[in-house]
Image: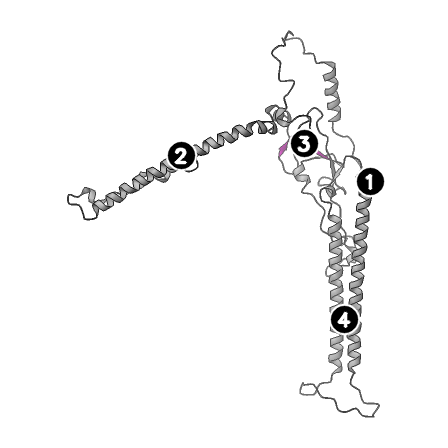
């Protein structure tokens, strides 16, 4: 395709007709306008020539690049035989209604096909309180230890711990870690060598070698669909958590965030109670202002003013409680971090 459409961009159809062209006596600016039009036309022609040169240079460089990368890309692009082999009997995904090769993922529970694009979109719910908890009423405070992260359920039968299995075709080994590259695949049953003469009659059925027949039967049996569901921990089952393994970290972060929120709310509530107690202890006059205290008397029935030491003791107690709560939360975070490190170490040792 051309870079720019120069011919249409500088079309002469839009040129306005000069009024003096149809007059016998020309105006004083007529010849000046004609010179400007001539200069503009020459400039347009020059721009067209430059653009054509750039266009030709672009096409030449593109052809050179295509020649250099033709050999490398020819092996990476799937061949026509491979595309026909894969998409001859395409299967429709029941979720997105798109057609894919018949070698689709199969759910471990109900044996339903699902494409990879739909499978990777399924994930766990965000951390939330249990739905069947009677104490989880609307408006009630959420407790950090009650947050859970439920495993993804099957979109077909709603079974928990959703997972899929995939059985690759045995007769096609291309792509990553394949026997050959995608561009080098050829269908052995379509290509007939020229040096082989076909002597069989039309009524005679073609004979297939015994070795090829065994390979075809083995591949057909291996690619057959399963007849029973598999357990969640069965070998070959791929779970949603294998794609998003950070669900434990998200659950821990949500619990810690809720715990810090609860601790902050408790501290604010305690400080408000202390301030309210101090304001209640200060008497007010009938005019609404605060009344000054008189000198202390020896009358035991008279009410004494609360000392400043009592208020400072209350504030000190609140500060100590806040420090204790912060220390408790930090200890919990450190314990959870150590547990996570131990679990990762155990997984590495198993591998």
Q: Locate residue 341 relative to residue 79 in the image: left or right.
A: right
Sequence-wise, the earlier of marks 2 and 4 is 2
Q: Which residue is mark 1?
A: 350
Foreground of the two, 221 or 42: 42
Element type at mark 3: loop
Where is the N terminus found, in terms of image quarters? top left
Q: Looking at the image, is mark 1 or mark 2 nearer the viewer? A: 2
Residue 101, position as x, y percentages in the image:
65, 30
Residue 223, position as x, y percentages in the image:
73, 27
Disc 3/disc 2 C-alpha distance (Å) = 43 Å
Q: Which residue is mark 3?
A: 176
Sequence-wise, the earlier of marks 1 and 2 is 2
Q: Looking at the image, is mark 4 or mark 3 nearer the viewer? A: 3
| Label 1 with label 2: CB-CB less than 8 Å | no
Disc 1/disc 2 C-alpha distance (Å) = 66 Å
Sequence-wise, the earlier of marks 4 and 1 is 4
Q: Which residue is mark 4?
A: 270
Is 101 magenta? The answer is: yes
| Label 4 with label 3: CB-CB less than 8 Å | no
Q: Residues within 10 Å of mark 3 (few under 14, many from 20)?
A: few
Q: Residue at x 27, y 43 (%)?
A: 37
Q: Locate residue 213 relative to residue 78 in the image: left or right.
A: right
Disc 4/disc 3 C-alpha distance (Å) = 63 Å
Foreground of the two, 120 or 317: 317
Foreground of the two, 59 or 253: 59
Q: Which residue is mark 2?
A: 53
**Range covered by the magenta-colored residues:** 98-106
Sequence-wise, the earlier of marks 4 and 3 is 3
When the figure is inspected, residue 107 is found, relative to residue 253, above or below; the finding is above
Q: Is residue 134 visible?
A: no
| Label 4 with label 1: CB-CB less than 8 Å | no
């Amino acid at each position: 395709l051309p870079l720019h459409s120069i011919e249409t961009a500088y079309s002469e159809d839009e040129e306005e007709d000069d009024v003096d062209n149809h007059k016998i006596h020309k105006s004083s600016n007529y010849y000046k306008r004609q010179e400007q039009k001539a200069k503009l036309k020459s400039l347009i022609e020059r721009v067209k020539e430059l653009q054509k040169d750039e266009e030709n240079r672009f096409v030449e460089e593109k052809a050179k690049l295509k020649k250099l990368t033709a050999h490398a890309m020819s092996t990476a692009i799937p061949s026509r035989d491979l595309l026909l082999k894969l998409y001859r009997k395409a299967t429709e995904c029941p979720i997105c209604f798109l057609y894919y090769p018949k070698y689709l993922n199969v759910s471990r529970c109900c044996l339903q096909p699902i494409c990879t694009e739909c499978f990777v979109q399924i994930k766990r719910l965000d951390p939330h309180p249990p739905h069947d908890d009677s104490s989880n009423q609307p408006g009630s405070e959420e407790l950090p230890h009650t947050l859970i992260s439920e495993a993804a359920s099957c979109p077909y039968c709603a079974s928990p711990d959703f997972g899929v299995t995939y059985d690759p075709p045995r007769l096609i080994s291309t792509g990553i870690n394949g026997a050959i590259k995608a561009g080098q695949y050829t269908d052995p049953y379509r290509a007939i060598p020229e040096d082989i003469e076909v002597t069989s009659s039309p009524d005679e059925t073609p004979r297939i070698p015994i070795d090829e027949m065994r390979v075809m039967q083995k591949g057909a049996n291996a690619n057959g669909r399963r007849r029973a569901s598999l357990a969640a921990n069965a070998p070959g089952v791929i779970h949603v958590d294998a794609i998003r393994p950070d669900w434990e970290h998200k659950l821990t972060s949500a619990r810690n965030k809720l715990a810090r929120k609860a601790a902050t709310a408790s501290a604010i509530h305690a400080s408000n109670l202390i301030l309210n107690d101090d304001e209640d202890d200060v008497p007010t006059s009938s005019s609404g202002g605060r009344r000054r205290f008189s000198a202390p008397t020896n009358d035991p029935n008279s009410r004494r003013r609360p000392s400043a030491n009592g208020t400072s003791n209350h504030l000190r107690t609140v500060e100590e409680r806040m420090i204790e709560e912060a220390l408790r939360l930090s200890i919990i975070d450190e314990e959870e971090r150590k547990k996570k490190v131990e679990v990762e170490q155990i997984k590495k040792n198993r591998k």
